[in-house]
Amino acid sequence: MASPPLSPVTVVGAGSWGTAAAGLLSKSGARVHLWCRRPELAEEIERRRVNERYLPGFELAANVTPTTALTSAIEQSPLVVMAVPSHAFRDVFREAVAGLRRDVVVISLSKGVEQSTLKRMTEVVTEEAPSIDQSRVGVLTGPNLAGEIAAEHPAAGVVALRDHAAAQQVQKAFRTSWFLVYTNNDVVGSEIAGAAKNVMAIAAGVADGLGYGDNAKATLITRGLAEMTRLGVTLGGQPLTFAGLAGMGDLVATCMSRQSRNRHVGEELGKGRPLDDITRETNMVAEGVKSTRALVDLARRVGVEMPIAEQVALMLYEGARPSDVVLSLMGRTVGAEWDGLPQVSP
C-alpha cells in the first residue's frame, strides 16, 4: 500500500520559486499552506488563485491555501519548505521556530550565504532550532527556473538530506510527471553549489553584455565550476555533487537562461548600467548580488582561490568596470587545468 503524502506542507515565502514549489507539492494531494509576508498578496492569491506579482499566468490548485499566520501554518506540518532569500532567511525562520514539530523535515530552497555570519541556510536552521534532528534539515536544488516548472516543462532537481528515509519522503512529495527528483546526502556541496552558481551567472551575463561570444561564456562556466568545486570540497562537500544537477546542471541553466535574474544583472552591468538602476527595476531578488561578498569572504577564510567571484565582487561593490574585470581574468597566471581540484578515481 502506498504511503500517504506528507500533509499539510508549509511553504514559507511566496516569491516565484516558492509559489512554483507550492504548485508542485499540491500535485501529490497534500494540503499546502503558502505563507505570504504581505496580507494583500495572500488575499490576491486566495481570490484569483494566481500570484500575479511573482509568477503571473499560472493558477494554483484549491488545496493551496495562502496565509500570513506563520506559526499556525506550520504547527501541524511534517514538512516545512523555506523559500525565503538568504538575507531574510534567519529573521523569518526565527519567527517559525515556535511552531515546528520535533520530527519536522525542513527543506531550504534558498541559494545564498548569510552575509553577516557566512553560514549556509541549513546551518542557520540548526542554529535557530537546535532541538530538531539535523539529519532532517536539507535542500532542494538544481536547474529549477520557476516559470518553466510552473509551465510543466520537463525538469529535475535533487533533494539533499542526511536522513535517507526523509529524503525519499521529500522526493515523493515533489515528484510529478514532469519534475524528476533525485536524492543525495551531500547537503554542504549542494548548498555551496547553489550559492556559488549565482555569482558565476553574473559573470556570464557580463560576457553577454560586453558582446562576447560562446567561447567566452563557455570558459567562464567551466572555470566557474572549478571554483565552486574547490570551495565546496574544502568545506566538506563531495566532488561528484558538482558534476550533477546541483552543480553543473544549475550552473548551466542560470548562466544561459534569459529568465535568470543573476545573469540579467550581469548583462546589464556589461552594458554599462549602474547596479542600483538594475536592481530597482525588478521586484525579485538576484541572490548573487546579496551573497557574492559573503561567498568571497568564506573562500578567503578557508584559503580557496576564487578569481571569478572576486572580480564579480569588485564590480558589484567597488565599481570596477566590467571590461577591466575581464582583462584581469585573462591576465591571470595559469598552470595545469586541474590544479587545486580533487581527483576522483574512476
Image (tube, rainbow, N blue to C red):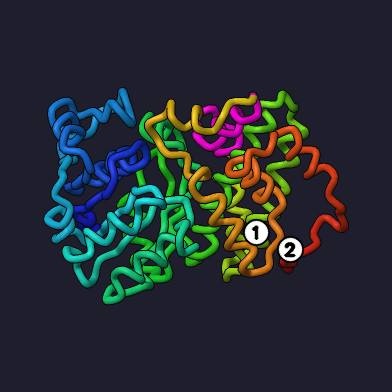
- Give percent across and percent down for residue 124: 38, 65
Disc 2 on helix, strand or loop? loop
Of helix, strand and loop, which mostly describes the magenta segment?
Answer: helix
Residue at 41% x, 67% y is: 123
Asked if the residues shown at circle 2 and circle 1 are in contact, with their CB atoms under 8 angstroms apart, the answer is yes
Magenta span covers which residues?
253-271
- Give percent across and percent down for residue 199: 58, 46
In this figure, which residue is indicated by the disc labeled 2?
341
Disc 1 on helix, strand or loop? helix
Residue at 29% x, 45% y is: 13
- Give percent across and percent down for residue 270: 65, 29
Q: Give the position of the N terminus as an image quadrant.
A: bottom left
Neighbour tally class for label 1: few under 14, some 14-19, many 20 plus, Cα within 10 Å: many
Res 131 label = none
Residue at 70% x, 26% y is: 210
User: Based on the displayed image, in which of its 4 quarters is residue 255 positioned?
Assistant: top right
Q: Give the position of the C terminus as an image quadrant.
A: bottom right
In this figure, which residue is indicated by the disc labeled 1?
229
Neighbour tally class for label 2: few under 14, some 14-19, many 20 plus, Cα within 10 Å: some
User: Based on the displayed image, in which of its 4 quarters is residue 137 positioned?
Assistant: bottom left
User: Based on the displayed image, in which of its 4 quarters is residue 318 positioned?
Assistant: top right
User: Along the line of sight, which residue is nearer the eye, 95 or 228?
Assistant: 95
In the rendered structure, the answer to whether residue 23 lies left or right of residue 182 reads left
Q: Magenta stretch: residue 111 in it?
A: no
User: What amino acid is found at the position of numbered circle 2 in the picture?
Assistant: Leu
User: Along the line of sight, which residue is nearer the eye, 151 or 297?
Assistant: 297
User: What amino acid is found at the position of numbered circle 1 in the picture?
Assistant: Thr
Q: Is residue 246 visible?
A: no
Q: Is residue 209 visible?
A: yes
- Give percent across and percent down for residue 151: 38, 29
